[in-house]
Image (cartoon, rainbow, N blue to C red):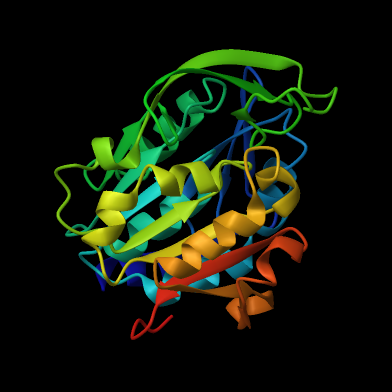
Amino acid sequence: MLDKLLSLLRARLRRRSDWYYLGNGVGLALTHFGRKIFLPGGDAGMTPEIILSGTWEPHVEAVLRRVLKPGMQVAEVGASLGFHTLVMAEAVGPTGHIHAFEPYPKVLPLLRNTLASNRFQGRVTLREVAVLHAPGDVHFAADPSQAGSAHLAIPVAAPSYTESFAVPATRLDDALADVPVLDLLRMDSEGTEGLVLLGAQEIMERSPRLVVVMEWSPAMLAARGDVAELANWIAALGFRCQRIERQGVLTPVTAAEMPNLAHCDVVLSRDGVEV
């Protein structure tokens, strides 16, 4: 409750121009709910949106805030600059926990500063690794003008993906082996969401009320596997799919429809779990 009251107060004090250049290409902004976030000045994606509006993917934020309750356990694959990490850490409160995974060396110092400046180190564990279906060292590629673009390198990557780096990878089942139950899994891993799920089958089995909020891009997913097969496998695990519309409104989607969706965000949940 105190977190929520403080957030509302900070939000009322936020101004449209709340952006502070700190030097070395790094700036500090305030989210619309009054949390501090460190941003790269050269980013053409998230940084301009957060500076001007204090928001990022408000449709996703609406769902996260609706689903999450104090004390919940969350895994986040692809924390990036940490906007949704802040949303979720605030929502689960000091008794909950966020297990955040981010492999991109370019954003990690900013993300660490964001967590520290909001005093969230106690409720967020940051793991600087990739999450896939098998452990090992993997190669990633990124577009230097897009802070959220880092992904598992593929031969058909666009010419703008000029950055490359090697990182260790883990399975979610291995990384969270000591977590009894997971309440929410948020993923934005640029096309490897299906591989993440393949490496999370044990924790999905022991988490019957798990809700998955994820980016769904058939074009990107198809570079790593059969999208129709993935959609049918998800349905076989007992999950129903809903597309996230504006303001967090949900539209049911069948497994047969999932491969033909335009790039969007979706929610996966099992029967009896209200989203």
Give the quadrant of residue 273. bottom left
Query: Which residue is at the front of the view, 159 or 97?
Result: 159
Residue at x-position 66% and y-position 22%: 141
Q: Where is residue 209 in the image (x, y as percent from the top left)?
A: 29, 72
Give the quadrant of residue 204. bottom left
| Residue 54 visible (yes or no) | no
Query: Which residue is at the front of the view, 121 or 246?
Result: 246
Give the quadrant of residue 238. bottom left
Quadrant of the image containing the C terminus:
bottom left
Left or right: 228, with 161 as reference point: left
Residue at x-position 28% and y-position 42%: 173
Seen in the picture, residue 247 relative to 131 is either above or below; the reply is below
Q: Position of residue 46 (x, y in %)?
A: 68, 44
Q: Where is residue 226 in the image (x, y as percent from the top left)?
A: 64, 48
Left or right: 227, with 105 as reference point: right
Q: Where is residue 163 in the image (x, y as percent from the top left)?
A: 69, 16
Seen in the picture, residue 42 relative to 203 is either above or below; the reply is above
Residue at x-position 66% and y-position 71%: 256
Q: Which residue lies furthest to the right in this view?
A: 159
